[in-house]
Amino acid sequence: VITRRMDRLPASHQLTLKVASVIGRIFILNMLAKVHPAKVEKTVLTEYLQSLTRQGITDVASLDPEIAYLFRHVIIQEVVYSLLTFNQRKQLHCAIADWYEKYYANDLTPYYSRLAHHWLKGENRDKALYYLERAAEQSLKHYSNEDVIRFINMALELDKTDKGNKSPAKVLQHARWERILGMAYFKLGKLNEAEGHLSATLKLLGSPLPKGSLASILHLLK
């Protein structure tokens, strides 16, 4: 039903909705104008969105501090997103991530998870890993421990393609991830999981936990 409804829209409106669907259910007008491949002016985009709002497809989300719109229903966003080709999605995700990095260059902290998402979808592996780690560290500070585990597990899954890399920098990175996981499980009260990940951290750093009480005491004294 939604696809047929999209087909009846002008091509310009269809493209605008497709670009917006990559940004998310809520999208800022300024961002939409910057990443729109047709380089449409904001005044023209506003006319498109006002028309789409009258048709019950989009709606105004906020006017301050920036004008933002939203898809009236998340299913509409998902269907429109599915109409894009893989390459179109990839290019748009990269353009959106690049916009975030430039527009919020003074403080990217609130956007780590969004940047991780867009660089991941844009298949920029290095940047995705960087922001996944930053998002995990941020979530750990805010006691969002389930999010910490999700972000680090995503990083570990993504990093499987580089599992042969045993460079000091890569080992240290994995040690950081294990430590972050260990602390998240500890805060959740899952002590067995926490011990496993924190022990893995020490092992990666070349200082594994010794077996036996005496050995542990000597290890700690050292």
Image: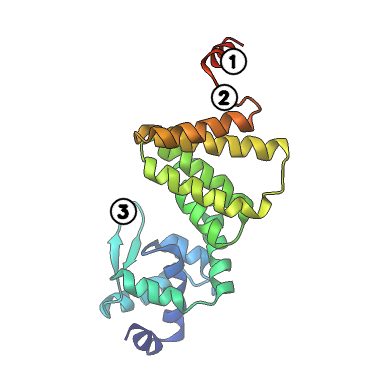
**Separation of marks 3 and 1 at Cα, in angstroms:** 58 Å
| Residue closer to the observer: 14 or 222 | 222
Residue with the mark numbered 1? 219
The mark closer to the camera, 3 or 1, is 1
- How far across and how far down the image is residue 3, in percent? 38, 85
Check disc 1: other Cα within 10 Å, few if <14, some if 14-19, many if 20+.
few
- For marks 2 and 1, the one nearer the N-term is 2
* Residue at the top extreme of this rendering: 221
**Mark 1 residue type:** His
Point 72% across, 41% down: residue:
166
Q: CA distance from mark 2 to mark 1?
A: 8 Å
Residue at disc 2, secondary structure = loop
Q: Position of residue 78 (x, y in %)?
A: 39, 72
- Kindly identify which numbered label has been placed on residue 38: none
Tag shown at residue 64: 3
Circle nearer the N terminus (3, 1): 3
The kind of residue tagged 3 is Asp
- At x 31%, y 53%, the residue is 64
